[in-house]
Amino acid sequence: MAPDTDLETIDKIIDMLGELPAAPIILNKVLKLTSDLRSNIDDISRYISADQTLTAKVLSLSNSPIYGRINAISSLSEAIKVLGFNQVKSIIITASTFRIFQSVAQSNIAHILWEHSLATALGARLIVEKYGELDKEEAYLCGLLHDIGKLVLLQTIPNSYEEVVEKAKESNLSFIQVEGKVLGFNHVNVGHELLTKWQFPDNLISQISAHHSTKINKKEYSMNLARVTAIADSIAKYIGAGFFEAYQALGDSVIFIGNKFIDEDDLISLRNGTETHFNAEMNSFYK
């Protein structure tokens, strides 16, 4: 975490966002309901239906090929019943996050960041589906929100963050290194504070915040979401959905998930699967 002086600056930056730190009322309510297995499907459906745009996206994404549906889903209650609470939660957060990205003034940069975030989320879900042990929807959320701090900085201090982007593009330095030099703190610090204000679970916040510090070419004792997010981030860059950072072939030639080595065939499968799902999701959002 950043020093106290930087925390004061970060708090001021987040305060500049206005409504964003509180998260939409509907989103907060639905997240609480979908986190409780005793919740009533009709209650969840009623809250979602209060937002026409959110309703359209939930139905659209629930009919996406990546969910393997044969018959079209035509009602919210049916979508919730078929997909389950966790996937519905992911869809709602995806749709809400997409709207946040669309609202940022620096739309071109935000669009590239959105694509990278979505590709990372989809890759993280596929990794957990293949290797098990963790919750695949939690992995998806970590991937989707791993760079949310960059979005906050684009929205609140656009000129300064455009300078960060340009310096990162011109150098071999990482965004964290450039942010530290230009701003005195980084997007991980900002994302940590925002997700805390959003009242996200502590374990997800800590895993999202740790994704830059894990070394994917080193064995770990056990599989964790930070490592999953870091690998998915690398896959996103490989398929061309990076955020102004090139894929590092040498550094990613040996990859471990926990203490398991990801062999070349499995890595190719994960890359291809991520790209296929990414293209399907992008078509859903922009059709």
Image (cartoon, helix red, strand yellow):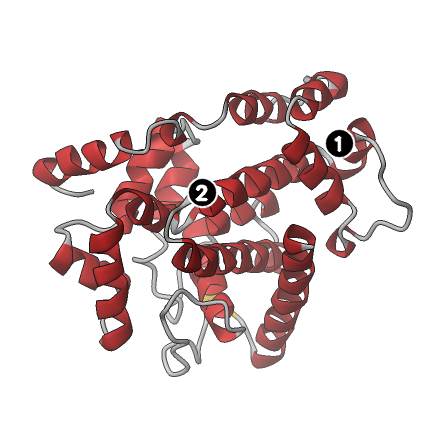
Instruction: Residue at 15% x, 37% y: name it.
Output: 9
Q: Left or right of 162: which side holds 101?
A: right
Quarter holding the N terminus is top left
Instruction: Residue at 64% x, 54% y: name it.
Output: 286
Q: Which mark is residue 103?
A: 2
Give x and y (percent) for residue 248. Answer: 38, 78
> Mark 2 packing: few (<14 Cα in 10 Å), some, or many (20+)?
few
Residue 256, compared with residue 106, is above or below; it is below
Residue 34, compared with residue 235, is above or below; it is above
Which image quadrant is residue 243 in? bottom left
For marks 1 and 2 on the same chain, the one whose residue lies earlier in the sequence: 1
Q: Which residue is mark 1?
A: 80
Circle 1 or circle 2, nearest the eye = 2
Give x and y (percent) for residue 32. Answer: 56, 22
Which image quadrant is residue 179 in? bottom left
Quarter holding the C terminus is bottom right
Q: Is residue 258 visible?
A: no
